[in-house]
Image (tube, rainbow, N blue to C red):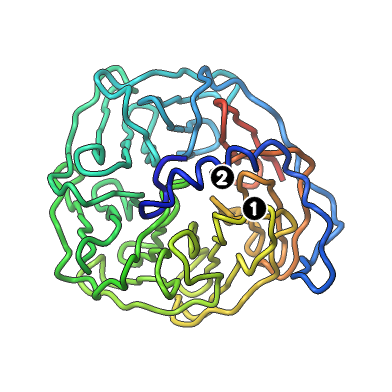
């Protein structure tokens, strides 16, 4: 798991998570430890699919029930146009050393890839022909920047998050889908060590034409950065999620409308421990309340609402996956072991989880 968190803990956590991912069954809860709330309702249907790659997949973007893009390490992407019956994987030419931690699919032909890494390892590519050719749109010229995730308001407007550099977030924005410009001057000052986690491409979410939320961690406080005007102005809001270390905080965030949202994260350095890894908001991200911790240990890497099911959410991480039908007040553990890093839905009948070894699961509620 190369640098999803600020250095120098990356190498230590990579080894920790590598050991921790072999079994997703939660250990017995010690006396006095935080106890998750588990519902016993029926679970969704999970169907394994063949992605065409063995690289770790870290992001997934359904365009609709049939067209889905996913991306990962080794400069890899994979796409389906038949709901996952067949996937076609490829490597962006000259990018085999890059890790595509985020992907945005817009059609069977048009998609964006974002690679995460220090300095020039952070890049953005676009294809207009289904992956046959790729155009590099952005390459970071700041050797201390580390871009984590991006999110689109529509086909041409998007924001890309970077870890803070010298107290400033070097966030970039596009208004034409082709050119990216810094909006760092519009962001609030960063806390010492504040960053995002490039685990699943979901450290940013958008809603409508102008609203966006960014989950942060790695600092004394886990915050949510929010804009209601497309990135021209921002506010920072405190959250109660586990925080205070370089390896803890918010990792994944989603909103189902203008006011209702859910935040997932945790302590990445403690894969065997339960923690306060879920928080919810009902006022557009201004205030957050703890939800029930997931019934799998460690951090949430990715979570997503299920469109059409209002308060239904699925959360996943290296140690397991679970779903909630009451917006994080209680959870049902999915059968495992599971080691999936990202999840996204086009509809209740068309969701996908992606993870290590090129694994893909289709999720049907």
**Which mark is first along the chain, 1 or 2?**
1
In the displayed structure image, the side of residue 86 where residue 100 appears, left or right: left
| Label 1: few (<14), some (14–19) or many (≥20) C-alpha neighbours in 10 Å | many
Q: Which mark is residue 206?
A: none
In this view, 295 is above or below 330: above
Residue at disc 2, secondary structure: strand
Labelled pair 2, 1 in contact (Cβ < 8 Å) = yes
The residue depicted at 59 percent of the width and 39 percent of the height is: 353
How far from the left and from the top, in percent, is residue 219?
40, 69
In this view, 28 is above or below 350: below
For the residues marked 2 and 1, what is the alpha-carbon distance in whole angstroms? 8 Å
Q: Which mark is residue 343?
A: 2
Residue at the disc numbered 1: 314
The one nearer the camera, 193 or 290, is: 193
The residue depicted at 38 percent of the width and 58 percent of the height is: 196
How far from the left and from the top, in percent, is residue 17?
58, 43
| Label 2: few (<14), some (14–19) or many (≥20) C-alpha neighbours in 10 Å | many
The residue depicted at 55 percent of the width and 36 percent of the height is: 65
Could you say which quadrant of the image residue 330 lies in?
Answer: bottom right
């Amino acid at each position: 798991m190369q640098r999803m968190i600020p250095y120098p803990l990356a190498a230590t956590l990579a080894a920790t998570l590598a050991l921790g991912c072999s079994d997703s069954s939660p250990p017995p809860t010690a006396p006095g430890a935080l106890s998750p709330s588990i519902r016993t309702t029926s679970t969704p249907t999970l169907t394994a699919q063949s992605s065409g790659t063995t690289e770790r997949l870290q992001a997934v973007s359904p365009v609709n029930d049939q067209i889905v893009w996913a991306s990962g390490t080794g400069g890899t992407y994979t796409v389906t146009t038949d709901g996952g019956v067949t996937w076609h994987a490829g490597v962006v030419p000259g990018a085999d050393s890059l890790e595509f931690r985020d992907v945005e699919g817009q059609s069977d032909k048009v998609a964006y890839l974002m690679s995460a890494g220090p300095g020039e390892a952070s890049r953005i590519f676009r294809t207009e022909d289904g992956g046959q050719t790729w155009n590099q749109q952005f390459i970071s010229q700041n050797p201390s920047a580390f871009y984590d995730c991006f999110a689109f308001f529509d086909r041409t407007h998007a924001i890309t998050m970077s870890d803070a550099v010298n107290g400033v977030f070097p966030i970039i924005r596009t208004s034409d889908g082709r050119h990216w410009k810094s909006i760092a001057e519009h962001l609030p000052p960063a806390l010492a060590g504040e960053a995002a986690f490039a685990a699943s491409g979901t450290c940013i979410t958008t809603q409508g034409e102008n609203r966006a939320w960014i989950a942060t961690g790695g600092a004394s406080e886990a915050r949510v950065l929010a804009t209601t005007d497309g990135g021209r102005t921002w506010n920072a809001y405190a959250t109660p999620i586990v925080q205070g270390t370089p390896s803890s905080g918010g990792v994944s965030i989603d909103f189902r409308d203008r006011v209702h949202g859910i935040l997932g994260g945790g302590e990445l350095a403690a894969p065997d421990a339960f923690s306060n890894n879920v928080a919810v908001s009902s006022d557009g991200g201004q205030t957050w309340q703890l939800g029930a911790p997931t019934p799998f240990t460690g951090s949430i890497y990715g979570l997503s609402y299920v469109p059409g099911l209002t308060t239904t959410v699925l959360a996943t991480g290296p140690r397991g996956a679970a779903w909630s039908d009451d917006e994080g007040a209680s959870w049902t553990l999915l059968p495992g072991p599971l080691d999936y890093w990202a999840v996204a839905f086009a509809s209740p009948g068309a969701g996908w989880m992606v993870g290590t070894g090129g694994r893909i699961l289709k999720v049907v509620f």
